[in-house]
Amino acid sequence: MVLAIGAHPDDIEFGCGGTLAKWSAAGAVVHHLVCTDGSKGTWNPDADTAALVQSRQREQRAAASALGTTGTVSFLGYVDGELEHSKEVTERVSLAIRTVRPDVVLTHDPWKRYRLHPDHRNTGLNVCDAVVAARDPHFLKHQLTGGITHHRPDALLLWEADEPNHAEDISAWVDTKLAALECHESQFESTMKATDEAAMDVFRTRIRERVAELGRPLGLPAAEIFHAMTRL
């Protein structure tokens, strides 16, 4: 059982899409949890942000399907750009961990140096705090009803880590990662800078070169890397 937690729709695919596709093909049940609504994912000042939120949820579900994942796709719905490191968010993520009961949790590394986007940083901090809360029967005891009990995952994997200590060979899953990323059509112009097919090819090449670069020191054609914490 796997729970991947991202700040925005598309973050999970960028951070660990190949890994999730690989694990899903091996039989793992993978769940997605997205913390914000993605409402600022456009450069258009006149955009209908309510419509954008709905589009981004549809895109996230399509991306999860493209990865072959079979678990739930859930949204906490916080406003894009305004996610706080808070007790409220930590409690909601803790409840998700206690409900899903994942063996592995994946999220942003909140301690990455010079991380600019606060939602990425705060998602990572909330998830790390939630892992601690979820594992202990004396934390958030009001959650422990209706069959829900405390739960300790076996591992927490942080993507975009400055000090990675774990790699997943995604050589066979790069195309799947790209297919999932391309489900996020609303982000072609803003995040991917892909306004036509030629620009999309540039984006695909950039992703291929990046995962190849990560794999090269390990003798792998392509990899996603993480800081893995197993003493939880």
Image (cartoon, helix red, strand yellow):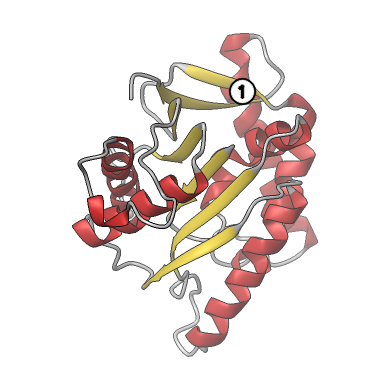
Residue at figure coordinates x 51%, y 31% from the top left: 103
Could you tell whether 181 is left or right of 147 in the image?
Answer: right
Q: Quadrant of residue 40?
A: bottom left
Task: Measuring from the top left, give residue 69's x and y in whole percent.
Answer: 71, 47
Q: Please tell me how crowded label 1 is: few (under 14), some (14-19), or many (20+) other residues with Cα within 10 Å.
A: some
Residue at figure coordinates x 59%, y 10% from the top left: 218
Task: Measuring from the top left, give residue 47's x and y in whole percent.
Answer: 51, 87
Q: Is residue 183 visible?
A: no
Residue at figure coordinates x 50%, y 55% from the top left: 33
Q: Residue furthest front?
A: 146
Q: Is residue 232 above or below residue 84?
A: above
Q: Is residue 99 above or below residue 156?
A: below
Could you tell whether 73 is left or right of 94 in the image?
Answer: right
Task: Measuring from the top left, give residue 145's x and y in whole percent.
Answer: 36, 56
Task: Measuring from the top left, give residue 220's x and y in whole percent.
Answer: 68, 15
Residue at figure coordinates x 62%, y 19% from the top left: 215
Type of residue at label 1? Answer: Glu
Could you tell whether 182 is left or right of 90 in the image?
Answer: right
Q: Label 1: state its secondary structure.
A: strand
Q: Quadrant of residue 28?
A: top right
Q: Is residue 148 visible?
A: yes
* Quarter of the image where the N terminus is located: top right
Q: Which residue is mark 1?
A: 168
1 or 113: nearer the eye? 1
